């Protein structure tokens, strides 16, 4: 066990930065590198393993594979005004943690989920069949286009992205925010989280983790044409000691021009 832990530590601390350097050397962007990483992480994973490891809601934030938290995500979006007739774009949908309960709630054809990882999309599609909700026609796609060029202007009511910007350089984040404003309806909303820095500068605990100063995020959103509101009621079903200390959730709406 100790040897395996040491090997994982060496990989994360030394192997991954080297791989990232190789991707840069060959002219490949962040999405290409992160796609490789996600598919590597998921190559031996399965829905059965996820369900077995996290059998039920534990009353604390347990990360990506805590599949039962998806139900809370949908309840939170409903609290903010989500209705069954809304068209929802789940950016970075993973294996369907939020997508499956969203697809159940929404009218048929109103859910679109995208992820960099083809393996995670495969698991999401397997989950659709497992739940027997094919008639809901949820769409799960593998995409790496930050410009969202395949989505029409003003076609989306709600954009939801969780634990995506926490693993993304600022330039990529800006691309997505610009594109999201284009596809979002004028009265739509965009819910996302980011990891807040403990200081007034960007912190990067690892090659794949980014923590941004709050003011830097706010200034960026203001420049890009968004009004924003920090949602302090996120994870309000958990005790304070069970919540992530750095994750901050924002609700965005489009600034309206005269």
Image (cartoon, rainbow, N blue to C red):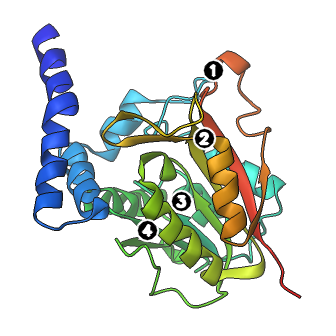
At a point 26% along the width and 58% down the height, the residue shown is 35
In the image, taking residue 251 as reference, residue 242 lies left or right, namely left
Q: Residues within 10 Å of mark 4 (few under 14, many from 20)?
A: many
At a point 64% along the width and 86% down the height, the residue shown is 155
SS state under label 1:
helix
Badge 2 vs badge 1, beta-carbon distance below 8 Å: no
Query: Which residue is label 4 attached to?
Result: 114
In the image, taking residue 118 as reference, residue 26 lies left or right, namely left
**Among numbered discs 2 and 1, the one appearing first in the sequence:** 2
Using the numbered discs, state the Cα–Cα distance from disc 4 to disc 2 in whole angstroms: 27 Å
Using the numbered discs, state the Cα–Cα distance from disc 1 to disc 4 in whole angstroms: 29 Å
**Front label number (3 vs 1):** 1
The correct choice, above or below, for 132 with respect to 203 in the image is below
Q: Residue furthest right?
A: 258
| Nearer the observer, 83 or 191 | 191
Query: Which residue is label 2 attached to?
Result: 213
Badge 2 vs badge 3, beta-carbon distance below 8 Å: no
Query: Which residue is label 3 attached to?
Result: 99
Query: Which residue is label 1 attached to?
Result: 242
Using the numbered discs, state the Cα–Cα distance from disc 3 to disc 1 in whole angstroms: 24 Å
**Among numbered discs 3 and 1, the one appearing first in the sequence:** 3
Using the numbered discs, state the Cα–Cα distance from disc 2 to disc 3 in whole angstroms: 29 Å
**Front label number (2 vs 1):** 2
Residue 169, percent across and down? 41, 54
At a point 13% along the width and 42% down the height, the residue shown is 18
């Amino acid at each position: 066990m100790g040897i395996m832990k040491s090997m994982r530590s060496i990989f994360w601390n030394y192997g991954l930065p080297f791989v990232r350097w190789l991707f840069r050397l060959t002219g490949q962007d962040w999405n290409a590198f992160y796609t490789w990483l996600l598919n590597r992480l998921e190559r031996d994973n399965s829905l059965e393993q996820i369900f077995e490891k996290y059998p039920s809601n534990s009353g604390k934030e347990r990360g990506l594979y805590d599949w039962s938290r998806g139900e809370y995500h949908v309840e939170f979006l409903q609290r903010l005004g989500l209705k069954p007739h809304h068209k929802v774009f789940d950016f970075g949908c993973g294996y369907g943690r939020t997508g499956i309960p969203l697809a159940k709630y929404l009218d048929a054809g109103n859910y679109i989920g995208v992820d960099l990882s083809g393996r995670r999309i495969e698991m999401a599609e397997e989950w659709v069949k497992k739940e027997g909700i094919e008639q809901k026609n949820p769409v799960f796609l593998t995409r790496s286009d930050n410009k969202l060029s395949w989505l029409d202007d003003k076609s989306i009511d709600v954009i939801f992205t969780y634990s995506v910007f926490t693993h993304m350089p600022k330039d990529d984040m800006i691309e997505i925010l610009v594109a999201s404003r284009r596809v979002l309806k004028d009265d739509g909303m965009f819910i996302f989280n980011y990891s807040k820095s403990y200081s007034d500068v960007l912190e990067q605990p690892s090659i794949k983790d980014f923590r941004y100063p709050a003011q830097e995020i706010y200034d960026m959103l203001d420049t890009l044409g968004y009004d924003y509101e920090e949602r302090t009621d996120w994870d309000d079903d958990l005790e304070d000691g069970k919540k992530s200390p750095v994750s901050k959730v924002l609700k965005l709406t489009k600034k309206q021009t005269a």
